Image (cartoon, coloured by chain):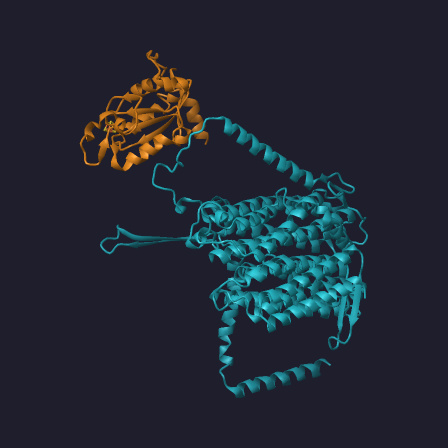
Amino acid sequence: MPGLWRKIRKTGRVAEPAPARVPAEVPAAAAELAGSIQIRHVDAGSCNGCEVEIGSVFGPVYDGERYGVRLVASPRHADALLVTGPVTRNMEVALRRTFEAVSEPRLVVALGDCARGCGVFAGAYGVVGAVGDVVPVDVEVAGCPPEPTAIVAALRGLTGR
Amino acid sequence: MSLVGWLFAAALALCALAAIGGLVWPRSWVAGAGTVAAGLAAATAGVASVVGSRWSAWLPDVLPLAGVRLSIDPLAGLFMAVTGGVSVCVAVYGIGYARTPGHRLDSRGVQAAVPLFVGAMVLVPAAASVSTLLLAWELMALTSLLLVLAEHRRRAEVGRAGLWYAVMTHLGFAAILAGLALFAAGAAGESFDQLRAAELPPGLRNAVFVVTLAGFTSKAGIVPLHVWLPRAHPEAPSHVSALMSAAMVNMGCYGIVRVGLDLLGGGPAWWWLVVLAAGALSALYGILQAVVTSDLKRLLAYSTTENMGLVLVGVGAAGFFAASRAPALAGLALTAALLHVVNHAGFKTLLFLAAGSVLRATGARDLDALGGLRARMPHTTVLFAIGALCASALPPGNAFVSEWLLLQSLIRVSPLSGVAGAVTMPLAVAVIALSAGLAVATFVKAFGVGFLARPRGVGAERATESPPSMLAGMGLAAVACLALAVVPALALPAVGSAAAVAFPQTPPGLVSGAVTLALAGVRGVLSPLLIAGSLVVALVAVLGTVRLLAARRARRVARLWDCGAGPMSARMEYTATSFAEPLQRVFDDVLAPETDVDVTPARESAYLVERVAFHARVPDRVERRLYAPLLAAVDGVGRSVRGLANGSVHRYLAYGFYALIGMLVVLAVLR
Ligand code: SF4
């Protein structure tokens, strides 16, 4: 325990300085949420590359929470879904139900090339389609996997902070 | 003969009539009606004697040599009233319960034994001589043993439970017999008046107290003599469990109060510290076992051990305060203990009867196979909920009042009691607090897992509500519990005058007030009625506000969140085992749970697993550590002397002959 405290004291702040926000229009549903957005992440069939990047977005270096976004454990607590991967057959119903479980106003962020258009998995036998084929998508983040900066920028576009 | 005498005689006569009726005409309502009448008579007799009318009688011709000596004072009256009240509820319930298809509880034997058992329990507190007490005690033990064994043909465990019960109860009987015989030998005779007047040397007094204490605590289910209780209670028919758990175990406490405080007139402080320690240990151990078990009736049985432990904490504290010359506190502690006896009888009757209804409807005692009974057995669910609320010692339950009184007496340790009191009493307070907390967890588990959510088994799915007579029996017990909870002043005068038998020098009116209870001499007030009223008002206010607010907002009907996977099933619910798991982890060192994992590898490769079996159980540690080695030793001795009994009649005759010669020689030398 003292070792941990020492480590915390020595390390100090590692978060990178917040880059300037790219001015963009906030979607109507997001504007209603007034700059604080709770996100439920759904892995609809990703290779886990996108998850690693999400992990670093909410880690100490990129520190996504300072922009008003937070990961939560249940769609019942969430304002937005962060969906990764192509939608596989096994996850189609689950994704649709998760979307229905989010209270309105609700947003869907499709993260990564797979979520946008099936990416490298396009045409695979287990894949139903892109996220947009199953639930309405509000924001897309490109990249395979998208860089944390891109994800942060997209999320800041929702919170407007 | 006074009113009490007539009522008492009527109770016994009705018990006998009911037993004969049950033998001759085994319809459940015959014996049931007789037992109800007997119970009413006994309860009225008890109340009458508590109010002030006393009665005693000597019937020299009933039994050879000693005769039968009876006397009913308020202390006896209180226990008689409790027994009578419990019997009424149980007998009403038994009319419907005995007709349970497949249980054969309407057989002649069972129908006759129930009223006899009730009669014996009415007789025990009325006994006023050693021989009468022992006779009634043995009658109580035998009739209850018969009833425990009622279903021995259906389940093999019943026989084993009966064996444990028979052995433990007779060892207890032997201890009481030995202790009281010592006592009577030192006194001028065996009637209680003579025992009271006796001047015994301190060594003998200590021996009498310790030996009878062992006997009485074994009846009260106090650790480490409790082992019969979690076996016999689950295996007995449920109305018998209620009688045993709510009325019979009380007799153990009665015996300790009668012999220790009344006949021996109190004693040195260490006696009572022993009683207090045994009580505290039982309270904790009992509730810890209850919180981890998943058998509903076993849970209730362990809760009995806990509550009897709390009663003994009160009795021990009372004796200790009396020994350290604090009569007001002693009276208060004993009042609390006796009030807890009454309260425990109320809610335990209700809970065991409700458990019986569940068992009848579902065929299951295992909480992990129950659930979903709220929709299928709504009345039983409400009744069990009332019992569970009372048992968890939270306001507005009845146990809350008696535990509050007990705590009040314990936290006011007088400076006179010295170091022993200053150390013991705070510990006792901590034990009571911890056991009350665990009791809440236990009964939340019993009610939540057993009655709410979805059925976990076929039995629970097909459950139907119990017949009206069973509901009526439970309803009576529930009304009594609620009345005691809201207006404890109904029972307090009776309890106070019973406590005054043990401590004649205590000032009267220790706890006064009809609505608000005020303690004499110390600052402490409690108003159960106001607490209950404000809780109800608060509940209504909160529910009303929520309704009102919810009606204003726009609503969207959404599917139940099931993690996006398929429909919810009963397998996803909390089970009793999983609910208790965190507590089991916390008390790991005390409970010593056993788990074992059996992995069966596939035939092709040791790395492929075909089947994994996981077993977890929490054994009774006292039984494992204390009784198992003891039984093994007895078994070993039995085996090693087997050579002596080789079946030859000549040899046996020779043994008898030599034993006789030996005795004669010993006598000749000693005389
Ligand atoms: S976009 Fe790339 S990193 Fe993300 S899930 Fe698809 S393949 Fe993996």
**Position in image of residue B459 (x %, y %):** 44, 55
**Position in image of residue B487 (x %, y %):** 70, 45
Whether residue B57 sits left or right of residue B207 in the image: it is right
Up the image or down, B392 lies above or below A23; here it is below
Looking at the picture, tell me which residue is in the foreground, B396 or B206: B396
Up the image or down, B647 lies above or below B206; here it is below
Report which quarter residue B182 is drawn in: bottom right
Whether residue A89 sits left or right of residue A39 in the image: it is left
Chain B drawing hue: cyan
Number of numbered labels in the structure image = 0
Q: Which residue lies furthest to the left in this view?
A: A123
- Report whether residue B554 is seen: yes
**Position in image of residue A63 (x %, y %):** 37, 21
Identify the residue shown where x is 63% and y is 70%. Answer: B19
Looking at the picture, tell me which residue is in the foreground, B585 or B503: B503
Identify the residue shown where x is 33% and y is 12%. Answer: A24
Looking at the picture, tell me which residue is in the foreground, B316 or A11: B316
Identify the residue shown where x is 35% and y is 32%. Answer: A98
Identify the residue shown where x is 42% and y is 22%. Answer: A10
Chain A drawing hue: orange
Looking at the picture, tell me which residue is in the foreground, B155 or B110: B110
- Locate the N terminus of chain B and report the quarter of the image it occupies: bottom right
- Report whether residue B217 is seen: no
Ligand 1 position by quadrant:
top left
- Locate the C terminus of chain B and report the quarter of the image it occupies: bottom right
Whether residue A112 sits left or right of residue B561 in the image: it is left
Up the image or down, A68 lies above or below B347; here it is above
